[in-house]
C-alpha cells in the first residue's frame, strides 16, 4: 500500500514538473506568468532573434529557424509573387513553420503597412487617407474602418499593422501630411479610436497594457514617436524645434490616448527633437514613453532607423546599435543585413556595453504582445478570413467615408445661384482632368507600391465611373483627360466636372516647398472653367495654392485622396447626401505663409480650420456661403488676442457655415 502511494506521489510530481516545464504554452495562465516561465529558458541568441525584424525578401524557413527570428515585415510594396491571397498564406505559413521548428517554438509575427486599408494587396478595399478622415470628425467611422482593415489584413494571414499614424502635421509641405488626421491635436486624439477597430476594445482597460481581442483583430502600431509632424519647413525626417511643453501638448498627447486604448506597439520617428535623433533619445523613449507613460508594449524602430543615428547613415553601425538599444528600442527593423546586426548586438552584450537587463526588458515586451495576440495558440493563418479581402460591406464603408470626408469650399460665384447639387438629368455634361478616371491617382501613395502610381493599379471605381452610374441613362457624359482651349465651346454641356490634383507620393518624395497644382491641372481648370459652368474637385494629400484660380470656379470641393470607392463623390455632388466634411487643416493662400495653424497669432487663411459649406437653396444660406468664410477668417485672426485679454475659448470645430 505504502509503495503504491509512493509511486502515485512520484508520478504526480513528475507530471506536475513536466507541465511546469512548459507553463508558457498553457493558455490558462496569465500573460505575466507565461513570460516569467519562458524568459529564463531563452538563450542570448534566442532573445536577440526575437528583437530582430527582417524583410520577407530575405526570410525563409531556414533563416527563421537558424536565427530565431521574431518578426518579419513587408517593406513598401514588398509582396510575394502574384500578390494573391494563396501566395500570402503560403509564404506566411513557411515562415511560421520555420519559427515553430525552433527549440522553444516561439511563433513569429508578420507586420505590414496598412495605412488606409490593406493597401499593399491587390483587390483590397482602399479607404481615404487620414487627412480626409480627419475632415469627418467621426471617431466611430474610423473605428469601423479599423475593424474592416483588420479583417482584410487577416485574410492574408498577417497579424500586425504599422498603423495608425497619429502625427499632428503642422506644415503641409511635409510629404507625409496626408497620413496625419489634422493640424489639431484634439482631432488627432479623437481619431485614435481606430485602435479599437484594429485591436478590439478591452473590457477591463489597463492603460499601457497591449491588447488584441481575437484572431479577427491585429496588433496596431502608433507612429511615429514623437514630433514627426512638426519638423522645420515640413522636411521629412528633419528636426522638430520646440520646447518640452510644446512637444507634449501638440505632438505627444495623442500617444496618451493610444496607450490608454491598449495599442500594442509604438514606432520611433526618423526625425529629431532639438537636434537629438529620436532613435537615440533615451529620455523620451525610456524615461517618458516607457516609465512615465507606463507603456508596456513593444517599442519598434523605423526602417533602417538606427542606421541614421549617425551621419552619414550607417557610418558607425556599432554605435548605432548601442545607442538605439540603450535608448529603449525593443525590436529593430534590419530588413536585409540582419546577420551583421545580430553579430554586433551579441558582441555588445557579451562585452557588457548593453546589459542583460535591457535585453530582458525588450524580450519581455515582445513576449507580452505575442501572448496578448494569442498567436501561441493560433500561430497559423485562419483561411476562413480569406473572404474578407475587398468585402462588399467594406467597400460600402469606404464609400461612406468618402462622402463624409468631402469638403465643400465654394458653391456659386458671388451673386449667382449655387451650382451644387448637380442635375442628374442634364442632357450633356463634361468630365475632364487627369484625376477623373484614374484609380491610382485617387488612392495616392502607399497603394500597392510604396510611392503608389497612376493607372488601374487595383480594383475599384473611378470618379468618372461613379458619375456615369449616377446621372440619367439619357445623359451624355463627354470625358476628356487633357482638354485644350476651346474644347468645351459648342459642346452644349450644361456644366463640367473638373477633377485634378497631385500625383501619388510617399514620405520624402512628397516633400514640396511649392504646393502648387501641377501644370496640366491648372490648364484644365483654365480651359474648361472659362467656357462652361464648372465644379472643380481637387485630389490631394493637403491643401494646395488655389487662390489664383478660385474666381474661375463655380464650385470647389476638396476630395483629398478618396481611395478605391469613387462613387462616394457622386453620391454627394448630385445631392443624394449633403456635404458633412469640415477642414482638418488650415487652407493657406500662399506658401510663404507656412507654417500656419489655427490659433497662430498671425492667421490669414484662404479657408480657416473647420470651414465647410452645406448645399442648400435658402436665401440665408446663400448669403452665408458667399460671405461667411471671410468673417470666420477675421474671427480666427483675432483668436489669440481675444484669448489673451478675455480668456475667451471656443470650439474650433464649430467654425462651420
Image (tube, grey):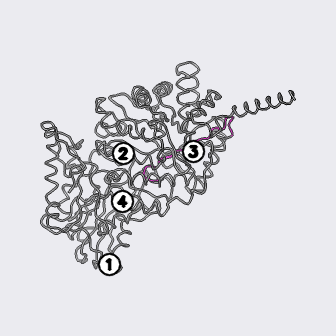
State the separation of the CA atoms marked 2 and 1. 40 Å
Mark 4, other Cα within 10 Å: few <14 / some 14–19 / many ≥20: many
- Residue 578's x, y, as percent? 28, 64
Decide which of tag 2 and tag 1 comes sooner along the chain: 2
Tell me which label, 2 or 3, sits earlier in the chain: 3
Identify the residue at horizontal 20%, vertical 40% (top origin): 600
Task: Give the class, few, some or many, for how many residues have Cα within 10 Å of label 3's Cα (few <14, many ≥20).
Answer: some
Q: Which residue is mark 1?
A: 475
Q: Nearer the viewer, residue 190 or 165?
A: 190
Q: Quadrant of the C terminus?
A: bottom left
Q: Main secondary structure of the magenta part?
A: loop
Q: Is residue 257 above or below residue 623?
A: above
Q: Which residue is mark 2?
A: 176
Q: Contact, CB < 8 Å: mark 2 with mark 3?
A: no
Tell which of 42 and 442 is nearer to you: 42
Q: Secondary structure at mark 2?
A: loop
Please give the range of residues in magenta. 101-117
Disc 4 designates what residue? 402
Instruction: Tell me where residue 246 appears, x and y as whole percent.
Output: 28, 33
Badge 2 density bin: few <14, some 14–19, many ≥20, Cα 10 Å? many
Residue 527 lies in quadrant: bottom left
Name the N-terminal-most of marks 1 and 4. Answer: 4
Q: Which mark is residue 57?
A: 3
Q: Tell me which residue sits at (49%, 24%) in the image.
A: 322
Percent from the top left, x then y, of residue 424? 30, 75
Amino acid at each position: 500500500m505504502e509503495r503504491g502511494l509512493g509511486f502515485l506521489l512520484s508520478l504526480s510530481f513528475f507530471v506536475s514538473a513536466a507541465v511546469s516545464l512548459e507553463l508558457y504554452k498553457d493558455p490558462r495562465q496569465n500573460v505575466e506568468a507565461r513570460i516569467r516561465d519562458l524568459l529564463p529558458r531563452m538563450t542570448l541568441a534566442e532573445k536577440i532573434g526575437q528583437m530582430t525584424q527582417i524583410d520577407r525578401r530575405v526570410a525563409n524557413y531556414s533563416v527563421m529557424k537558424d536565427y530565431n527570428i521574431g518578426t518579419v515585415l513587408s517593406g513598401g510594396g514588398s509582396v510575394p509573387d502574384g500578390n494573391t491571397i494563396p501566395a500570402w498564406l503560403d509564404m506566411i505559413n513557411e515562415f511560421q513553420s520555420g519559427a515553430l521548428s525552433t527549440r522553444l517554438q516561439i511563433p513569429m509575427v508578420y507586420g505590414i503597412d496598412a495605412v488606409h486599408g490593406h493597401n499593399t494587396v491587390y483587390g483590397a478595399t482602399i479607404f481615404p487617407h487620414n487627412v480626409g478622415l480627419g475632415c469627418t470628425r467621426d471617431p466611430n467611422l474610423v473605428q469601423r474602418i479599423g475593424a474592416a482593415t483588420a479583417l482584410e489584413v487577416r485574410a492574408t494571414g498577417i497579424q500586425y499593422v504599422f498603423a495608425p499614424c497619429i502625427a499632428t502635421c503642422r506644415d503641409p509641405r511635409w510629404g507625409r501630411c496626408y497620413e496625419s488626421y489634422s493640424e489639431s491635436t484634439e482631432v488627432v486624439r479623437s481619431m485614435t479610436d481606430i485602435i479599437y477597430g484594429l485591436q478590439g476594445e478591452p473590457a477591463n482597460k489597463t492603460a499601457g497594457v497591449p491588447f488584441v481581442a481575437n484572431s479577427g483583430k491585429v496588433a496596431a502600431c502608433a507612429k511615429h514617436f514623437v514630433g514627426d509632424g512638426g519638423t522645420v519647413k515640413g522636411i521629412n525626417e528633419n528636426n522638430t524645434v520646440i520646447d518640452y511643453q510644446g512637444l507634449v501638448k501638440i505632438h505627444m498627447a495623442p500617444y496618451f490616448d493610444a496607450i490608454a486604448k491598449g495599442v500594442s506597439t509604438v514606432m520611433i520617428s526618423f526625425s529629431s527633437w532639438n537636434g537629438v535623433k529620436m532613435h537615440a533619445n533615451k529620455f523620451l523613449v525610456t524615461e517618458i514613453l516607457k516609465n512615465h507613460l507606463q507603456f508596456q508594449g513593444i517599442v519598434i524602430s523605423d526602417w533602417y532607423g538606427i542606421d541614421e543615428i549617425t551621419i552619414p547613415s550607417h557610418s558607425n553601425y556599432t554605435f548605432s546599435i548601442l545607442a538605439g538599444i540603450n535608448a529603449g528600442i525593443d525590436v529593430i527593423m534590419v530588413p536585409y543585413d540582419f546577420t551583421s546586426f545580430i553579430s554586433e548586438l551579441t558582441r555588445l552584450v557579451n562585452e557588457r556595453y548593453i546589459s542583460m537587463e535591457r535585453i530582458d526588458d525588450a524580450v519581455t515586451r515582445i513576449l507580452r504582445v505575442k501572448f496578448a495576440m494569442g498567436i501561441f495558440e493560433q500561430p497559423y493563418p485562419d483561411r476562413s478570413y480569406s473572404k474578407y479581402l475587398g468585402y462588399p460591406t467594406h467597400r460600402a464603408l469606404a464609400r461612406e467615408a468618402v462622402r463624409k470626408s468631402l469638403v465643400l469650399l465654394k458653391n456659386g460665384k458671388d451673386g449667382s445661384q449655387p451650382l451644387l447639387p448637380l442635375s442628374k438629368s442634364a442632357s450633356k455634361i463634361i468630365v475632364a482632368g487627369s484625376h477623373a478616371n484614374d484609380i491610382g491617382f485617387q488612392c495616392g501613395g502607399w497603394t500597392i507600391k510604396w510611392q503608389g502610381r497612376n493607372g488601374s493599379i487595383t480594383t475599384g471605381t473611378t470618379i468618372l465611373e461613379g458619375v456615369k452610374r449616377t446621372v440619367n441613362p439619357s445623359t451624355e457624359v463627354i470625358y476628356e483627360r487633357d482638354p485644350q482651349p476651346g474644347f468645351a465651346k459648342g459642346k452644349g454641356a450644361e456644366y463640367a466636372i473638373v477633377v485634378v490634383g497631385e500625383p501619388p507620393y510617399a514620405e520624402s518624395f512628397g516633400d514640396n516647398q511649392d504646393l502648387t497644382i501641377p501644370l496640366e491641372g491648372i490648364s484644365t481648370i483654365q480651359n474648361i472653367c472659362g467656357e462652361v459652368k464648372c465644379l472643380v474637385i481637387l485630389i490631394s494629400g493637403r491643401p494646395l495654392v488655389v487662390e489664383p484660380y478660385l474666381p474661375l470656379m463655380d464650385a470647389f470641393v476638396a476630395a483629398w485622396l478618396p481611395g478605391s470607392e469613387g462613387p462616394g463623390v457622386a453620391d454627394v455632388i448630385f445631392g443624394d447626401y449633403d456635404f458633412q466634411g469640415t477642414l482638418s487643416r488650415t487652407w493657406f493662400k500662399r506658401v510663404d505663409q507656412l507654417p500656419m495653424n489655427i490659433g497662430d497669432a498671425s492667421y490669414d487663411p484662404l479657408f480657416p480650420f473647420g470651414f465647410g459649406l452645406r448645399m442648400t437653396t435658402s436665401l440665408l444660406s446663400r448669403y452665408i456661403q458667399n460671405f461667411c468664410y471671410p468673417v470666420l477668417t477675421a474671427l480666427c485672426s483675432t483668436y489669440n488676442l481675444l484669448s489673451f485679454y478675455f480668456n475667451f475659448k471656443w470650439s474650433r470645430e464649430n467654425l462651420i457655415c
